[in-house]
Amino acid sequence: MPQTVPTVSGIPILVKFSKSMKETVPGGWILLSILFLALNVPARAESGSAVNVSMSSPSIGLSAASARTMFFQDDEDQLERVWGIDFEGNETYSGMTLRSMIALESPSTFRKLRFWNRSGFDFDETELRRDEIRIERFYQRRGFPHVEVTSSVEEGRRDWVRRITFFIEEGEPTIIESVQFEMDADSSVVAHLEDQRDFTRAKERHVMREEQRYQLIQHSDVEGLFQSTLRNLGFAHADAFVTATVDTTGRHADVIITLNPGPLSTFGEIHVEGNETISERRVLRHSELRTGDQFSSQKLRSAQQQVFGHPLFRFVTVSIPEQPRDSVVDISIRVREHALRSLRVQGGVGLEETVRLGVSWQHRNPFGNAHGFSISTRASFLEQRVNVDYYIPYVFNPKSRINIAPFGQRLDERGYLLHRAGISNSFIYQISRETAGTFSYEFTRNREQIESPDVEIPEEDEYYNISAIKLSGYHNQLEVEQYQGWAIRPHAEFSGFLGTGSLRYNRYLLDIRRYLDFGPSSQFAIRNEGGLLTHTSLEELPSNVRFYTGGTSSVRGWQRRELGPKRAILDDDGNFVEYIPVGGKALYNFNLEFRQSLDWLIRRFGVAVFLDGGMVWEEIDEAEISDLQFGVGGGFRYNSPLGPIRIDLARKVNPTDEDLNIYNGEDHGGWFDRWGIHFSLGQAF
């Protein structure tokens, strides 16, 4: 018998859902639409008529009463959801650690707020039993052979909510009673190894020591440690094995570490493949691998990093090809070169520079000698600059290089306009991947114009030369896409060395940063920055040498360079126009920022809250901590492929009259004088 489809105002009702529709249309709108249809189904639909509702392509006929029940309940809420997971009895490992070991998941506090989408976090009784086994095995592999794990499931206030508690009885752990070393080598090799500091240190510091908890998972750690140590000491074919006799009743273990060093090895033939425009000899020179030198795995890793550090190469591998176990080890170096010439165009926007555009052209091997040459220019409403760089990558060794860089610059800051041209010569030494130092000499010819009708500079002071020696360095644990660990950046500048140049001064800066992670999505970032200018008076210092602060990357309650001492600008009639910063000889800044990723809500999106503080003093002896001014605020972050896109809003906590544009008691300011708004690419620090 054909079914009768109910109508509303003569229009047949046919409601069809698909899984894709469910995911793309907000749940609230679906619920309201279904509620409207259910309340408006004519009474005759209840007497046997049906509403056609389908979750996929086939239609499912339901009685009107059943359909009305379905309409009032989100189909996903019928599934049991894990809404919380707790652990009791776990003394050795935290709940966070144990949650990462199991398959069942519960939503975070923020995720629970997404009431319109409760998909995921399904409760599965079978998976719960498997999780009990997973936790037991986790403990057993870490030295708790008698662990027992049970669980309970409680229903929440809503019938689909399930809260899980795992009860853990860890039991007594197995303790290492003895550790013995067995060496499969003759006495001369054993004596040689015992004299090596790295080997004795590995024996003292490995994790499987007496009176420590015996953990099966540590076998591979100990084996890897001794293999690496022996191979760095010249034994290319070294192996290590860990075995243990475990008494589960007496809860103790006897560990035996067997070492097989093999022959002491040297580097044999070193083959280079893939080089097109550079000679094999230059690749070998950058690798620092030499035939006949004692083998070392560390040397192979260092060679790969040093060759890859050259701008000509985009891919480098250093490996040991298949060969017989022998005292001579052949090495293979594979490289892949970048295009010799490249053109790069970059652009950006921000509230300080408004629009920024940069163009650079690079030749990576102009004379076949692995040197580099580039021409670059950048322009914005704040600065225009042209650079020519000649790069010599190898001086004493691959870690040392020289840059020769003539340049020209026009800088339009509030209060002054600077034109300068000069040359910078730098010697750079890469101590390690994280640490480098730079020694440079810079000579510039400068012309500065002060933008103030009430200040006149003598003609001879408009032009000046700076001849300065600069020492700088960095220790930086930051990765390409991640801020982490410590970053320390000292800088010292000595102008007028041996009577050269027009100005004599010493300038010191120190920037220290620390990044503390709290889980995978939260970070607390700290920065302290200080600076001093000595051996000259403030009046003798040109504007571009002085210290300034305030802006998108310092104290964000203020706009660029606007925090600190200022002077008033008056028009020809003596009326107030504005305050402009004058800079100073002492500087201190600090930044405290908490960063929270919100990937659970919007992919690549995050927020931050911060407290900034700082001050510039005209003279060093005027510096007082009580003078510090503070800005507090927050902002949004979007992790684009080019870096974090950042929008910050900050409020001045303790502004001065100059900050608020109050002159002689008269307010010339507005709402924006108390706030700083910043838009930029990249984190503030």
Image (tube, rainbow, N blue to C red):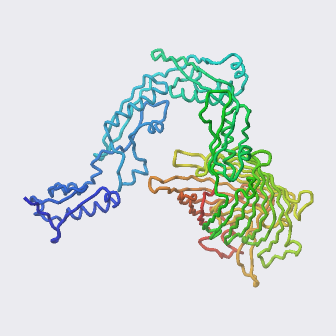
Q: Is residue 38 left or right of residue 21?
A: left
User: Residue 317: percent from the left, percent from the top?
Assistant: 62, 43
* 667 w.r.t. 232: above or below: below
User: Residue 574: percent from the left, percent from the top?
Assistant: 75, 82
Quadrant in the rendering for residue 502? bottom right
Count of marks placed on residues: 0
User: Residue 164: percent from the left, percent from the top?
Assistant: 36, 38
Quadrant in the rendering for residue 306? top right
Asked if residue 229 shows in the view, the reply is no
**Which residue is more in the foreground, 565 or 442?**
442
Asked if residue 162 shows in the view, the reply is yes
**Which residue is more in the foreground, 143 or 265?**
265
**Which residue is at 39% across, 26% downward?**
148
Quick one: quadrant of the N terminus?
Answer: bottom left
Q: Is residue 517 left or right of residue 475?
A: left
* 213 w.r.t. 445: above or below: above
Quick one: quadrant of the C terminus?
Answer: bottom right
**Which residue is at 74% across, 32% downward?**
292
**Which residue is at 17% across, 67% downward?**
12
Furthest residue in direction bottom, as rendered: 573
Quadrant in the rendering for residue 206? top right
**Which residue is more in the foreground, 420 or 77?**
420
User: Residue 335: percent from the left, percent from the top?
Assistant: 64, 47
Furthest residue in direction right, as rendered: 499
**Which residue is more in the foreground, 24 or 452?**
24
Q: Is residue 349 left or right of residue 38?
A: right
